[in-house]
Amino acid sequence: MHVLPAVFVVMAALLDIVANLCIAKSRGFSRLGWGFASILLIWAAFFTLGFAVKEIDISIAYSAWGAIGVLGTVLLGRVVFKQKISSRSMVGVIMVIAAVGVLSFSG
């Protein structure tokens, strides 16, 4: 994987994580400012991901983006919102990351 497309995947994932936190802050879009911010951030994440898929297969880029997004959202949900993370949830997160690793090296 080339460095620049990988940077775009990570940037897209970070935007996605912040968008997820904004969605939580919006409380089901009842707080419109947070909801609007989440929509803009998701748009920016997909826009950024578009640069990555010019050089990386979509299956790899999207999977990596998703895995980073899942891990980041779980961890920041714990830090920002004091959400509990069960051991079963952590096993699921680890499985997602492992699956993306296998997918990345299988092509």
Image (cartoon, helix red, strand yellow):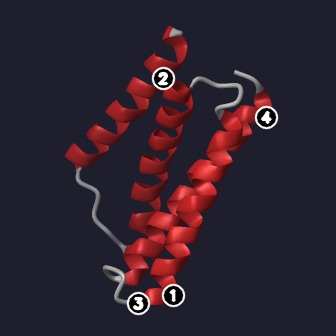
Which quadrant would residue 1 be assigned to in this image? Answer: top right
State the image coordinates of residue 43 (x, y, percent, origin top left). 57, 60
Q: Secondary structure at mark 1?
A: helix
**Crowd around label 2: few <14 · some 14–19 · many ≥20 (10 Å):** some
Three-letter code for the amino acid on which mark 2 is drawn: Gly
Three-letter code for the amino acid on which mark 3 is drawn: Arg
Q: Is residue 11 visible?
A: no
Three-letter code for the amino acid on which mark 4 is drawn: Leu
Of tags 2 and 1, which is closer to the observer?
1
Three-letter code for the amino acid on which mark 1 is drawn: Gly
Measured Cα–Cα span from mark 3 to mark 2: 37 Å
The residue at the point 49 percent across, 9 percent down is 106
- Find disc 2 in the rendering and name its residue: 101
**For residue 33, which numbered disc appears in the image?**
1
Measured Cα–Cα span from mark 3 to mark 1: 6 Å
- Find disc 4 in the rendering and name its residue: 4
Q: Secondary structure at mark 3?
A: loop
